[in-house]
Image (tube, coloured by chain):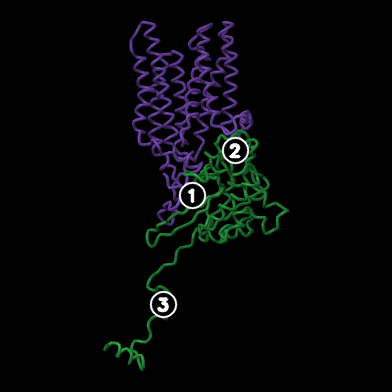
Amino acid sequence: MHPAPSVIIFTTLSGLGFGLLAFLGLGLPDVSGWVAFVFFAIAFGLAVGGLLASTFHLGHPERAWKAFSQWRTSWLSREGCSAVAALILMGIYAIGVIFLDQRWAVLGWVGAALSLITVFTTSMIYAQLKTIPRWNMNLTPAMFLSFSLAGGALLAGQNTAAIVLLLIAGTVQLAYWKQGDTALADSGTDIGTATGLGSRGKVRAFEPPHTGSNYLLREFVHVVGRKHAAKLRMLALGLGFVLPLLLLLVPVHDVVVKHLLALIAVIAHLIGIATSRWLFFAQAEHVVGLYYGKR
Amino acid sequence: MTQLPQSTDRKMGLVIDLDTCVGCHACVISCKGWNTENYGAPLSDQNPYGADPSGTFLNRVHSYEVQPPEGHAQLIHFPKSCLHCEDAPCVTVCPTGASYKRSEDGIVLVNESDCIGCGLCAWACPYGARELDLAEGVMKKCTLCVDRIYNDNLPEVDRVPSCVRTCPAGARHFGDLGDPDSAVSQLVAERGGMDLMPEMGTKPVNKYLPPRPKDRIEDQIDILAPLLAPVADEPKGFIAWLDKALEKL
């Protein structure tokens, strides 16, 4: 799949933002006033910034509001609905925490649940697609949710939770790569089933339909950069999980140093997750590539 | 509405004969010609006369080589367009309701004024049947020439999809695949029509007729070959004298 920057930015940032919102909704950390304002500003900035980035790849962004209508069947529509619901509820909750020194607990819990549901619906947009075996796995929603929770815990300064969740997320990442690498082969779809000619002998793409490129090849048959996949995986794992874990485990008591280390941990995590997300798209093989002999 | 109909009154679709297709691409051109100036936004080209031309097409012809375990390889031309699936994954993923499957004839269409160009339907299609038009920013796909097949302004012979009308080899057939007595259904039954990627669970309406096995060349090239063998081995008369005279020279 073509790794479009808009979708990578969107899934990375809003995953992190909704993860932080989930923790804030649970009252972790239990803050109010200006400190709460800063926490909520970061969370809303990431979540809304990501959602806005996702509209950049649309052919007609001005019609985006129509996407709220088909929640009965469409995961993309469900994502839009739950994102807006989560942001509205958490917005009201934030007003209470920041300005009125009131923590409406139930509202916070519902907001936290909706934030995580939003991340789940995002993951299902990808996981539902049978056409991309590497995404069509239970580990895809597990990966999106564990990343979001780990990043949220990291941003919310919940050190113990962050350590546990980073370990879980890193493990899910490794399992996702392992299962994903054989997903296309395991799916049973190949050029033989694609053309229906497989039972007759070995099928080879002889001539493509045209000499130039087309939308399908540009969108679905991305092969550039795969040669660096192994290195990028190490980078994603190291920056996204290992380095933040080590930084959290460093025994420091000075508040300034502690915050500095946490900042480095968050930035490393963000770069690691963005790298992982780039690989998520760049390595995904759409079965339409089989028709072009490109798999 | 992106909920698929439980069942459709008719299942209009195409039957493509891989045995007959000669790979001339006439269907590709006639499809582009008809559909760029009729239903919906035109099918744009990008940089058509430059070094890297590309454009939107609703129908494309691939060519494959099949090498059986024994014998000669076979070249198969393979036209591919929307299969108007019964369980169309492109429809259910649409967030705006722009994509829909008609309950009366099963045709899968895009309402272009509702399409936001997110591309998710093209991601969901295993066959590469949908292409986002770069000039218009909306999704384009085969309409089964919905503006021809019911068009009373056209002579009856033309009320079939443009690709079917054009095919010089007669490799494309159009009809109701939901009616077991229709000519296309009979053709599918007779020739063992098949689905593409049946494991995807899309239940395509369009069927492909597999190529017939190639003739096998064994001892004899042609039944007429024995008649072509030389008949006169010893010349006689004038020819014999000429033969000898020329040899002595």
Q: Amino acid at mark 2?
A: Glu
In this view, the residue farthest toward the left is B248
Q: Which residue is mark 3?
A: B225
Q: Residues within 10 Å of mark 2 (few under 14, many from 20)?
A: some
- A272 lies above or below A3: above
Q: Amino acid at mark 1?
A: His
- A263 lies above or below A288: above
Residue B208: horizontal and vertical position, in percent? 53, 55
Q: Which residue is mark 2?
A: B136
User: Mark 3 or 2 closer to N-term?
Assistant: 2
- B96 lies above or below A33: below
Q: Residue at x 45, y 15 (%)?
A: A155
Report the Cα–Cα distance between label 1 and label 2. 22 Å
Disc nearest the viewer among 3 and 2: 2
Chain letter of the residue carrying label 3: B
Q: Amino acid at mark 3?
A: Ala
Report the Cα–Cα distance between label 1 and label 3. 41 Å
Q: Which residue is mark 1?
A: A210
**Chain colored purple:** A
Question: Mark 1: which secondary structure?
Answer: loop
Residue A84, picture quadrant:
top right
**Which quarter shows the C terminus of chain B?**
bottom left
